[in-house]
Image (cartoon, rainbow, N blue to C red):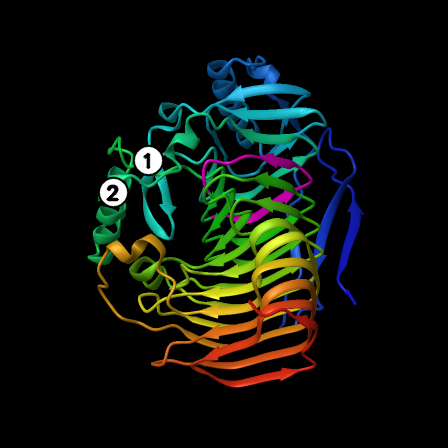
Amino acid sequence: MNKAMVTIAAFLLFSAGAVAQQTKTVVADEAPFEMAPLEMHVFPARDFSITRYGAKPDDVKANTVAFAKAFAACSKAGGGRVVVPDGTWLTGPIHFLSGVELHLADGARILFDDDPQLYLPAVKTSWEGMECYNYSPLIYAYECENVAITGAGTIEAKMDLWRTWFDRPEGHMAALKRLYSMMSSGVDIEFRHMEADTTAHLRPHLIQFNRCTNVRMDGFKIRHSPFWTIHTYMCRDLYVNGLDVYAHGHNNDGIDLESTQHAVIENCRFDQGDDGVVIKSGRNQDGWKNAMPTSDIVVRNCDAVDAHGLLVVGSEIAGGVSRVYIHDCTSSSIVNRLMYLKTNERRGGVLEDITMENVEANVQRNALFCIETDVVYQWKVVPTFEVKPTVIRNITMRNVHAKKTPVMIRIMGDGRCPVDGVRIENASADTVTSAVSELNNARNVLMDGISYGTIIAK
């Protein structure tokens, strides 16, 4: 079923001291849209071990400095690998520079300290689709090109402090209201400093590539995260392969592709406290201003072990989402939904040409397929500045099976802008505990080959 191909061609580098290298072209010509091959950057054969720059096991200050020095030396030399050897390396933030591959040797463990002061000064980032200054992501790249994280080692976050920030007390909600108001009224990002409020507690991302080009993540493990685990924001040309991600804290999505274009994600395992693979494109005014949809995304051969959703689109989708294809994946334990599109009347944007097929699932808590257009969460506490219903069209699910689900197909559209064009083909469930379908404000819905074994009424 999977016609995907990954081709590898070897070539020689003739510069002094160079050795044979490989270039990797990642092809996804099985996509139902034209998908150009990914041409991933080849890093020069130069290694910069962090121990050369003073790294010492369990010495957070020495290691933070060592990473910075190693990245600077590697980038200045024209690129190469910053190598993390076997052992545990306690550190503060790691900031990328262009042309650098961060390589984790087998047995290497980067352990990020959880002292918030280490992640200052604040950097340009975003929080749930709103741009701001905040604590630095633990691994952060801004306006970089040709960057990578590779190797068999582990990236882990200490969580003692971050866990105390999981709740949404009064100070946190007040900070979110201020940020939302600044975004909605056009306040420049330079004035949106959220780290200055010591009660805001806007947790940092574990890994964020922000406005980067040609990004590769390959082979490593992740254990725990303060917030979203992997976040690509306004990036192009992304390849993610063979990751083993486990993070069961609050808002611990596996990977969030936000305003990201031209990406392949494959052979990954996501065991999450929130969603698995997430597609976003900014919240409200910031999404409209940046006007960068997420598009040309292929996800294949991945497993959502335990998550809220296998593929979730939203709810921050103001910039739009188009041409997303997920196929030949599994949900081996339990998720809320296999495919979930969520938005509300504040978002606007267009969601179109999204397809899931060839998925084998275990137990669903909510539905196989779900579209909801009134998902607001805690943001009910802030006013609606502008009403912009989301256009949702041309959505497909095909060849999907689950052992158990409450509902097979749930579509809750907006009467002002009904969902238009949904095709569900060859979807089956062994047991349905509530209803086969629930449809509201949806037109041109085709359901063909829907089958189930037993319906157990509540």
Please say if the residues under marks 1 and 2 sit with CB atoms less than 8 Å apart: yes
Residue 434, percent from left and from top? 56, 69
> Dot 1: what SS?
loop
Measured Cα–Cα span from mark 1 to mark 2: 9 Å
Residue 433, percent from left and from top? 60, 67
Q: Is residue 56 magenta?
A: no
Where does the N terminus fall, quadrant-wise? bottom right
Using the image as rendered, state which of residue 401 and residue 346 is in the foreground.
Answer: 401
Residue 428, percent from left and from top? 69, 72
Using the image as rendered, state which of residue 178 and residue 324 is in the foreground.
Answer: 178
Q: Residue at x 43, y 32 (%)?
A: 163
Residue linked to disc 1: 201
Residue 394 at least partly seen: no
Quarter where residue 440 is shown: bottom left
Q: Residues within 10 Å of mark 1 (few under 14, many from 20)?
A: many
Quarter where residue 6 is shown: bottom right
Where does the C terminus fall, quadrant-wise? bottom right
User: In this rendering, would 243 be left or right of 175?
Assistant: right
Q: Residue at x 29, y 61 (%)?
A: 285
Check disc 1 and give the amino acid type: His
* Residue bounds of the magenta highlight: 212-227
Using the image as rendered, state which of residue 105 and residue 327 is in the foreground.
Answer: 327
User: In this rendering, would 237 be left or right of 387?
Assistant: right
Q: Is 146 drawn above or below residue 114 in the view shown?
A: below
Check disc 2 and give the amino acid type: Ala
Residue linked to disc 2: 175
